[in-house]
Amino acid sequence: MGTPNETQGAGAFIVSEANGSASRDTATLLSGQNGKAGYVLGRVTLGAATAAAVAGNTGNGTFGSVTVGATAKPGVYRLTCIEPATNAGKFQVEDPDGIVVGVATVAAEFVGGGLTFTIADGATDFVSGDSFTVTVAAGSGKYKLVDKDATDGSKAAVAILYADVDASAADKKCVIIARLAEVNADELNFGDLDAGQIATAKTELAARTIIVREAI
């Protein structure tokens, strides 16, 4: 893992970038971080999830808490009962884009589409067409050091902090390298990522036209 010099200058990790300011964006560094030039950043794109029964349901089973995973999408998921059963039943789960991501069984944990939850059985069984919605809030859009254990969207490497910014006490405006650049691997900080995760992060940056060059 490349570990930057704590005193390296702004943009010292850049090998080349596009003319003008095409490679750079203004962004917000999330509070709680003393950011250094060369930090590889993820973006907070996901917030909390809330579930609700759709008005008119026959079944009165309840929806437990929802855990949002890194692959979830912001927006409204829809769950529709497609196979009623006594003290059971199955619900088709569609993500916010209308893509079917699995079938949830009543009283069993469902994992799919970036969500984890359980639908509990009620005194009155569900019937075909009963439904729930799960709304995943959009994240703040702020940036933080990439974290492969994060579930708020910041698991993916999307940018690099251009210059030191101390956001220890509060959010701070910052400049990021967001695209169209070559950067020196030895001047980057990937946080706690292991070798395999760093390789993944480099691929994620490359998808955004930020190319990490080795041994420059």
Image (cartoon, rainbow, N blue to C red):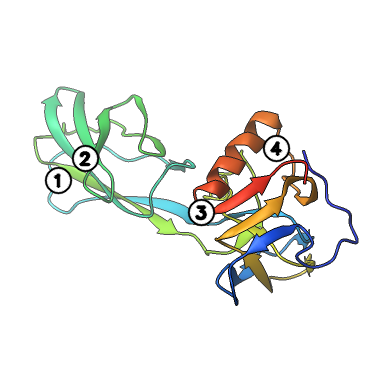
The tag earlier along the polypeptide, 3 or 2, is 2
Marks 1 and 2, Cα distance to the nearest angstrom?
7 Å
Q: Residue at x 28, y 45 (%)?
A: 95
Determine whether 126 is above or below 132 in the image: above
The secondary element bearing badge 3 is classed as: loop
Q: Which residue is mark 1?
A: 57
Counting residues from the N terminus, which is met first, the one under dot 4 or under dot 3? 4
Percent across and percent down for residue 167 are: 75, 67
Of the residues shown, which amino acid type is indicated by label 3?
A: Arg
* SS state under label 4: loop
Front residue of this view, candidates 184 and 135: 184
Residue where numbered disc 2 is placed = 60
Query: Which residue sits furthest bottom?
Result: 20
Residue at the spot of label 4: 193
Depth check, mark 1 against mark 2: the one in front is 1
Q: Nearer the viewer, residue 113 or 52?
A: 113
Q: Residue visible at 39% across and 35% down?
A: 117
| Image marks 3 and 2: residues in contact by CB distance under 8 Å | no
The 10 Å Cα crowd at callout 2, few under 14, some 14 to 19, many 20 or more, is some
Compute the Cα span from label 4 to label 3: 19 Å
Find disc 3 in the rendering and name its residue: 208
Classed neighbour count for the residue bearing mark 4: other residues with Cα under 10 Å, few (<14), some (14–19), many (≥20): some
Marks 1 and 2 close (CB-CB < 8 Å) = yes
Residue nearer the viewer, 186 or 159: 186
Q: Position of residue 35 (x, y in %)?
A: 77, 61
Disc 1 to disc 3, how far (Cα)?
A: 45 Å
Type of amino acid under label 4: Leu
Q: Which element is circle 2 on?
A: loop
Mark with earlier residue (4, 1):
1
